[in-house]
Image (tube, helix red, strand yellow):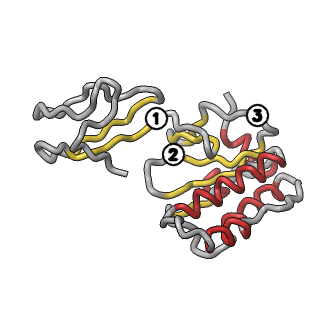
Amino acid sequence: MTELEELVLTPGERAQQVPVDSVTFTMDWTGEDEPGQLAAFVACRIRAFGAEPTDVDTDVVHRTADDDPTLRRGDAPVRQLDHLSDVVARLGYTMVVRDSGTDTYEVLVARTGGRELTGLAHEGVPVRAWGSEPEESLVSLNCPNCSEMLVWELPAGQTLADERCECGAALFDGAGRPLPGVSLHD
């Protein structure tokens, strides 16, 4: 199995025992503090590996977002990550995120040469290529009958078919879809 450090740290950084957290960009779900921070971070990491990135910016995303009346709060960071993920893939890198269970994006740039990333973790936290499906999903809701908050951490592909609350209220149908009156938390 490939270690995350081998992918996101340069040989020199590994020799100096630079921690992975020092090459991580953390962005709130609502976006950057200042426009261009994410793109600058990505370009800096690619330069650290000795390549000169071109077109590593999010100006086009910002311009498009300004003219999009359907854009909701939190949509812009996803568009930026999608855009940069495509750009860095053409250069042989992969945008990766740590699934820490918070509402922030913890972004790293991995030197992959186009290889697919699977099964990575860092300090017990899953790490995956941006745009790939998480290996686990978190489902939470408040029971419509007793108001108890219920939370499940499900492996990929598992559903909550025919799940019930401890109070007896049916929550999901046989296919794992929420029943009428059951609202999942975002």
User: Please, what is the three-letter code of the amino acid marked with disc 2?
Assistant: Asp
Rendered position, 14 above or below 174: below
Question: x, y (%) of residue 142?
Answer: 22, 46
The secondary element bearing badge 3 is classed as: loop
Which residue is pictured at 47% across the width and 30% down the height? Answer: 156
**Residue hosting label 1:** 136
User: Please, what is the three-letter code of the amino acid marked with disc 3?
Assistant: Arg
The secondary element bearing badge 1 is classed as: strand
Q: Are the residues flagged by discs 2 and 1 in contact, CB closer than 8 Å? A: yes
Which residue is pictured at 84% across the width and 48% down the height? Answer: 91
The 10 Å Cα crowd at callout 3, few under 14, some 14 to 19, many 20 or more, is: few
**Residue hosting label 2:** 99
Left or right of 71, for residue 110 = right
Rendered position, 47 above or below 139: below
Query: Reading the chain from its start, which is encountered first: label 1 or label 3?
Result: 3
Q: Give the image quarter of residue 180.
A: top left
User: Please, what is the three-letter code of the amino acid marked with disc 1?
Assistant: Glu
Left or right of 66, for residue 162 = left
* Separation of marks 2 and 1 at Cα, in angstroms: 9 Å
Q: Quadrant of the N terminus?
A: top right
The 10 Å Cα crowd at callout 2, few under 14, some 14 to 19, many 20 or more, is: many
Question: x, y (%) of residue 173?
Answer: 27, 28
Query: Reading the chain from its start, which is encountered first: label 2 or label 3?
Result: 2
* Separation of marks 1 and 3 at Cα, in angstroms: 22 Å
Q: Give the image quarter of residue 62.
A: bottom right
Left or right of 77, for residue 139 = left
**Residue hosting label 3:** 115
The secondary element bearing badge 2 is classed as: loop
